[in-house]
Image (cartoon, helix red, strand yellow):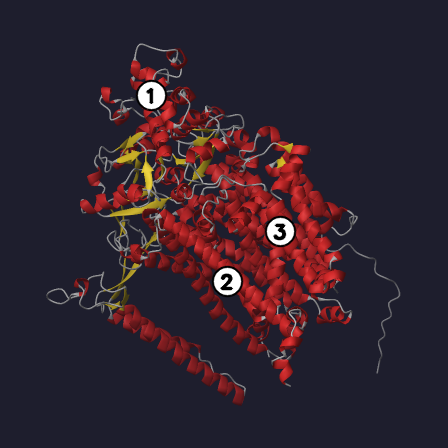
Amino acid sequence: MTETHFVRTQMIEEQEPPGATTGAVGWMRENLFSSPLNAILSLLSLAFIYWLLAQALPWLISPTWQANSLTECREIIAEAGYGGACWGLIRERFLQFIFGFYPPHLYWRVVLDFALLAVALAPILFTGLPRKMLYFSAVYPFLMPWLLWGGTIWTPVMAAVGFVIGYLAQRFLKPVVGDLAATILAFVLPVVWWIFLAGPVPNAFASILPLAIETVESRAFGGYMLSITIGVVAIALSLPIGILLALGRQSDLLIVRSLSVGFIEFIRGVPLITLLFVASTLLNIFMPPGTDFDIILRVIIMVTLFASAYMAEVIRGGLAALPRGQYEAADALGLDFWMAQRLIIMPQALKISIPGIVSTFIGVFKDTTLVSIIGLLDPLGLSRAILADSNWNGIVWEIYGFIAVMFFIFCFSMSRYSMYLERKLRTEHR
Amino acid sequence: MKQTVLVGALALAGLSAGVAGAATLDDVKARGKLNCGVTTGLTGFANPNANGEWEGFDVAVCRAVAAAILGDPTAIEFVPTTGKTRFTALASGEIDMLARNTTWTFTRDVDLKFEFVGVNYYDGQGFMVPKELGVSSAKELDGATVCIQTGTTTELNLADFFRANNMEYEPVPVETDNEAQQQYLAGACDAYTTDASGLAAVRATFEAPGDHILLPEIISKEPLGPLVRHGDNEWGDIVRWTLNALIAAEEYGITSANVDELAQGTESPEINRILGTEGSLGEMLGLNADWAKNAIKAGGNYGELFEKNIGEATPIGLARGLNAQWTNGGLLYAPPFR
Amino acid sequence: MSITTAPPKESFRLGMLVYDTRYRSITIQIVALIGFLILAGWLVNNTLHNLAVLGKPIDFSFLKDSAGYDINQRLIDYNSQSSHWRATVVGLINTLLVAFLGCITATIIGIIVGVLRLSNNWLVARLMTVYVETFRNVPVLLWIVFTMAILIETLPAPRDFRGDDSEASMVLFDSVALTNRGFYVPEPMFSRGLGDLPILADRSSPACAVPEGGGPVSDSCGLFQVSLDLLLILAVLGAGFYVSSLIRKRADRIQNQTGDRPTTWYLRLGVVVIPTVAVLVLLGFHLGRPELKGFNFQGGIYLRNSLIALWLALSLYTAAFIAEIVRAGILAISKGQSEAAAALGLRSNRIMSLVILPQALRVIIPPLISQYLNLTKNSSLAIAVGYMDLTGTLMGITLNQTGRELETVLMGMLVYLSISLCISAVMNLYNQRVKLVER
């Protein structure tokens, strides 16, 4: 019996991996042509991309930036011998697409407003920033309408004073009249303030210290500015309503729960366009005779209601994701309902819900295009108005393409942010 | 009480809009602005230009009314309305008047409770077809696919026309002129039907207008005019007589160029009455004596507005036709100012 | 003790309504209810008052009046003399049609894209990501308008088909015409058909009178008519599938007893196909081909481009969302599950159907339902391309012609709400069943 032993006495030199598995070739073999089916799919995809570019590029690259009408575009293209798109329209109407009919000398207010929006949102969205910035976030909701619509500064100040009154009532009346009464007063007093005093008082202040900026009617709003305004205002207002609805839906109280469920399911069950029809044709009929909101305000009201129902569901998801122990711990500390919500539940639930809130916002922002159907001049509605100009009548792709690209940029960046946030939250919770 | 709640809420938001009352004139004066409903965009009749200013034939009527009341043709808010929202906007008081190519019909006047104050454009529904189709009469359109704008009287006229002639057709409803034009040019419909003025306006913007013909049949009467709510006759009078002043101004040769000169006083008592140097017509309307002068100065008389916005010198190139003065064989006939 | 139910008057203080937990919840609820009733009453009161001022009391009698307008796509008999009510029904059927078609194609595309996004082919996965992101981040209204524009601008007009050396030609053996007015496809016809069955017909109405010498009644008889041929074929198909499922169960039983599964696919295919083909032959089935006559193609089934644009845009848009749902569903199943199933000796298709799918479906179904709901609701954007759905008829032309905003909009909302609730209910039932499988 012979035993054969093999003992390696010297190492084989380390070799380069086979050429076909490294570099571009290897990558392609692994990622594009790993099997016959994959190879076919890859070739089909390549052919599709080539076809798309071959169709689009010659049209996109067009020397018509300076044209002043479609006829001029056609002349320029005929002269140049290439191109197809008529970009002069975008050049001429770009500012109109962004600002609508807002007075040009006040454009800075819109820009400043949305810049401040970013500043106000930053501490909420990025936890690394100093917490002091949250004070600005609290002031912003009052600053924003003032900058957009103008008028005396005392109106937003007085509106804010209402909230301060509510806070003070909750804070200082509690030892005097008790818990629930203080809560009720915290709701009632600001309302009384707004109804009876917020009207005359700003006028009085305005006559003493007239701090006012030029008023802009909401009819002057248009283009992307209108979409963003509707989206931002609706989402901001829908947040508190959504929280209340979500709490109502989770409540043990039968009537409160049924009202919340009924509202949420009704709004979620009908298309937004029918709600906009209500805004455009019916809302004034529902109001007392003589009241007349302008159409943009009515649309904001209906979009807010719409967003609230969706927001309520998002927040309900956040509440459901909280471990039961959090509620019990809050109870064990002896906190009452509102304190528990304010100090324990909501901060956590809202944080979990932020990705959902962002995607609701994206949805609402996209849905603002529907207002063109009821005659508001959002980017899509504006495009129709612009195309009625006999200089540009007949253009299709340039304008829709432009609007689509702008929407894509807005929404894509927001959805990327929401995904980043989701990833971050996931690691924190594991 | 409830009303105070709402008014308070409005004041709070700082966004309160005008309140529709019985006396529209007072509201307009208090507001300092006229709210005028127009289309969301129809070539030649109403569209915003690059500076965001509205222009067009219907817009000019609004401007004349604003000038007559407030002395300023720019003291005006244009409210774009769709076929669906226009009547509710007017009924709810959101707008003071509607100048939006609206056909004067019995049901709109009586059932929907509006008051048409006159006609600023006599139109009729026609058909446009490509020349190569070889069709020379609308009666030959049996089986054709017809593009049609929704939300107007045109779809009813079309249904009636084809039924009366015992013909089949395939309606393709579209929302706007621009979409109709796109479908028509691509051959997705054989014919495009809308008001003849609209057809002419659309054809003018084609790359090759000569390849398309308007069929001779006009299948309906479409008197287009501004309208106001029922129930405020004083307001209706103002809009009616402003329109009449524009028409009469053309008849008597008052133009935006010579109106200042004529307002010094002329030989003609009718001109003097219109321009407020004789009589007190303005006062009767509750306006200043120079109301008509301001209205005419805003953009010119009816003829000037027509030529500037939709006339033969513009790309739209409409002939006066029915819309000529009665002295020239048209239908425009302003009642006497006395 | 009786004190808890009826406390003595002197010891009951108003404060107890607020502080006593026995009463507090009732107090809050009653306050909420009263608040709600006041709000509702206020709104109704305002509405009635305003309508009285406008001189337009709530009145649904306009529904009986003749509509006066034509609708191009009508699955039930309709003409311009029919009532507004019938126009509403035509619109509703069109809404349901596009929603149904859209849900099916969106699901198919969504599943394919969702799976391809996980593909190890880099290019394909990237391409699918681009597709999903592009469609998700641009408003659906724009997509609808875009799709319509693409159909109109790229496909040939019917007149291009004319002549011997025409610019365009029909596809699939000259049976399908793709034009920018829509697609004309062959239509199933029966030379020995059984006729139609009117539903909800009033036998005494003149429309339902049997013509002299027999023959079918007129198309306008009844609410709508159902083809008896179609019913027969569906019945035969149903019976075939039932027998086929019996065979499958028998095969399952044999497999459980013996471990061997008999080969049954030809039998199962046979019981479905052979009777159906036999019935088709008996009924004299043939295809009616579209032909260019006059201005348009005649014959065949005409899918208008408004339907196709809406269908395609809604499907592609919703599919982008469904793809994400499917991807998330597949990723949610841990790899251990398929490994465990493989360790049990299951084959890969059985692993998919018995292990992966039931669990993935549990994750996929709830968001899928809300996508179906979204698609149905988004179908109301049909007016952008002139597809005559419920928004186009009832809340569109009928509203414009009658000026009855309140009645039409409320009716429209109620209809959409009922559709949504039905879809939720059906899908929730299914969801319950899927859930049971797991537990």
Q: Where is mark 3, residue-wise?
A: A192
Disc 1 from disc 3: Cα separation: 57 Å
Name the residue nearer the viewer: C254 or B200.
B200
Percent from the top left, x then y, of residue C71? 31, 51
Whole-percent x, y for residue A6 in the image? 85, 72
Q: Amino acid at mark 2?
A: Leu
Instruction: Check the image and report above or below for C121 versus C273.
Output: above
Q: Residue furthest left?
A: C213
Q: Which residue sits at x=39%, y=38%?
A: B182
Residue lying at the far right in this picture: please name it. A9
Q: Residues under labels 1 and 2: Cα distance?
A: 59 Å
Q: Position of residue C335 (x, y in %)?
A: 66, 70
Q: Chain of mark 2?
A: C
Question: As drawn, is A218 to the left or to the right of A374?
Answer: right
The residue singled out by tag 1 in the image is B303
Q: What secondary structure is marked by label 2?
A: helix
- Does the image show residue A29? no
Q: Residues within 10 Å of mark 2 (few under 14, many from 20)?
A: few
Chain for numbered disc 3 = A
On the same chain: label 1 and label 2? no
Q: Nearer the viewer, residue A94 or A242?
A: A242
User: Residue C111 vs residue C241: left or right?
Assistant: right
